[in-house]
Every structure is written in structure tokens, then in C-alpha cells.
Amino acid sequence: MSTDKRITLQQAAEIVKNGSSLTFSGFTIWRRPFALIYELIRQQRRGLHLIEVNGGPQTEFLVGAGCVDIWESCWVGHELYGKYGANLSRKVGNKEIIVEEYSHAEMMFRFAAAAQGAPYAVTQTSLGTDIHNPEFDMLGRAGKRDGKRIAKQKYIFADDPFFDAGPQVLIPAVKVDVAVLCVQQVGEEGTVRVAGQLYSDPEACRAADITIVIAEEIVPEEYLRRNADHNTIPTFEVDYILECPFGGHPTGMFGKYDVDGAFLKDFYTKTRTQEGFDAFAKEWIFGLDHLSYQEKLGWPR
């Protein structure tokens, strides 16, 4: 058995360089890798390009901390604990961040295309909407479309040449430097087992150049082999692993712990201003590590 893939939380954060494109596991308020997100904020990472099937609390924390320059997705918020992303909204209003919007389905198709090694996806999703208004090609307007890590064009219209099915939209596959997954179990060599819904985790992993897996527990590979059909991602698709119990808090981890709704609601209420965010970060992020963060929360909680 090899343990060469094991790293610390601090080492994981160092893999995410300034200017990196980044994506995460989970969905809205479930299985977001908050232990690493907090560490990125502590290390004052800057210029990040978040590319997400959908946003959530992780987006709001990184955006509020000034870590993000570009955000590509369709929605951000805290579900019933705070509907919209107040930090992202504030940064957009102040012209401090570029938001490139696709529909939810288009974002999923872009990740699926990247996972398959395809340069683009073809869909009819969002035809006739302002998603395809050229005025809203924000990366194009900012002169960011270099054809390398960011596609030359946001989309292209084309007619179906095979079955005459009419207009189609060609949308570029995502280019992601690092994917960070937060899961229940990972094997010592990197086999991932997710309990509950998988969301877009397999696609996020396969779309990224580097995949880091934060797990509630690291278990023997032999244990995962017993019911191999329950496994989600194979070892060769995972670059680094680390064991970090409660690493998803305040988001939930199916079978382990629920969403901490009170914590998210408190965050949403207090961080509608930058001063409010800075005060919240001073209390809950800076000066702490993951263990002292849990101790501050209180073990009964």
C-alpha cells in the first residue's frame, strides 16, 4: 500500500496558486471542502477563477475574502439559510469581480465535455434567452478570452448537420487547474467512495489537472475493494488525499453530519457589508486552524 498521496491541509492550500482556476465537490450546501477554503483565506490566496456547476457558501466565503477575480456559474446562495449571495452581489456592484453566467444545464454540460476529453458540448439549452446575449460575454468584454485556459468564444450557434434538428449551441469545455472534493471516505491509494448523491463530483475530478480529496476518514483500499461497485472515483484520477473530520462544516455530509443552518444564517445576516464579512472572518477564520475551529464551535454541536 502506498501513502505517497497524503498531504496536510496547509500543503493542499499551497497547491492552489494565485490565479488558479478552481472547482469543488458537492451541491449548494452539501459536501463543500470548507477546511481548505478557510485555509486558502488564511493564506490570502488571490486572483482565483472559480468555475462551478453551481455556487454556494464556499463561493461567498472566498469572494468576501477577496480571493476571487472571476466566477463562472449560474447561481449562488445558501438555500433556505440565505437565498442570494450577498458578498458576490456586493463585489459585482463595486465592479471588483467578473461574473460569467451560463445556465445550470450548460455548466453541467461544460464539465461533462471536459471529463470526456471533448473541446465543447452541444445543446439547445437556453436558446432564446439573454444567457446568449453577446452584451453579457463578460470575459470577452474584459479581454480575457485567450483561447488557452479561457475559450476564445463564450458560445457558437450552429445548425445540426446530421438530423436537421435546428439551431444548436456549442459551449466550451471547462479548463480547471484544481478540483477539491469533500467526501466520506477515500482509500489509502486514492479510491473515492461517496455516500448519497454524487452530484457532479466525477466530472469535476476528470475535468481538472489536479484533484485533491478531503475525506472524513482514510480507509484501507482492501476495505473499499469488498464492495467495489459502491466506489465513485478510481485511484488514478486522484492526486492528493487528506483526512479531515468535519472538513465540510458548515455544509452537510450525508451520513455523517447535517448542514449547520444556524451558522450559515448567521454568516448571511452578518456579511452583507465588507466590514461585516471582515469581522466574521476575524472571529471564525483567522487565528484558527481546523482543530481550534471545531473547538470554538463546541464538540456537542
Image (tube, helix red, strand yellow):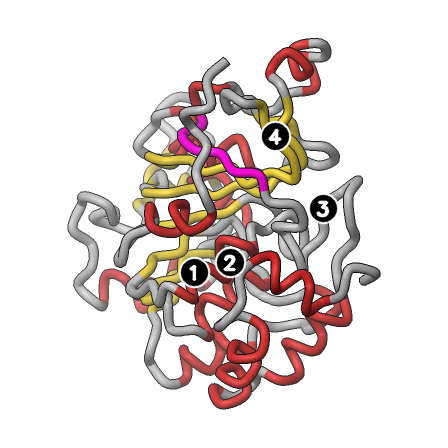
Q: Secondary structure at mark 2?
A: loop
Mark 1 lies on residue: 101
| Residue 31: numbered disc | none
Q: Secondary structure at mark 1?
A: strand
Q: Determine the CA span between mark 3 and mark 1.
A: 28 Å
Whether label 1 touches label 2, CB < 8 Å = yes
For discs 1 and 4, the disc positioned in front in the rendered view: 4
Please state the horizontal and vertical placement of residue 225, each as a whole percent of the image.
65, 10
> The disc labelled 4 sits on which kind of residue?
Ile
Quadrant location, the C terminus: bottom right
Q: Secondary structure at mark 3?
A: loop
Mark 3 lies on residue: 253
> The disc labelled 3 sits on which kind of residue?
Met
Q: Is residue 109 magenta?
A: no
Looking at the image, tell me whether mark 3 or mark 1 is earlier in sequence order: 1
Please state the horizontal and vertical placement of residue 170, each as a whole percent of the image.
36, 40
For label 4, the crowd category at 10 Å Cα-Cα, with few meaning under 14, some 14 to 19 and many 20 or more, is many
Place residue 12 in its image quadrant.
top left
Looking at the image, tell me whether mark 3 or mark 4 is earlier in sequence order: 4
What's the magenta bit mostly, secondary-structure-wise?
strand
Find the magenta span and give its range: 238-243
Looking at the image, tell me whether mark 3 or mark 2 is earlier in sequence order: 2
Identified at 71% across, 74% down, the residue is 265
Place residue 219 in its image quadrant.
top right
For discs 3 and 4, the disc positioned in front in the rendered view: 4
Q: Secondary structure at mark 4?
A: strand
Looking at the image, tell me whether mark 1 or mark 2 is earlier in sequence order: 2
| Residue 218: numbered disc | 4
For label 3, the crowd category at 10 Å Cα-Cα, with few meaning under 14, some 14 to 19 and many 20 or more, is many
Examine the rendered structure and indicate whether residue 247 appears above or below residue 262. above
Q: Determine the CA span between mark 3 and mark 4.
A: 15 Å
Please state the horizontal and vertical placement of residue 80, each as a whole percent of the image.
75, 67
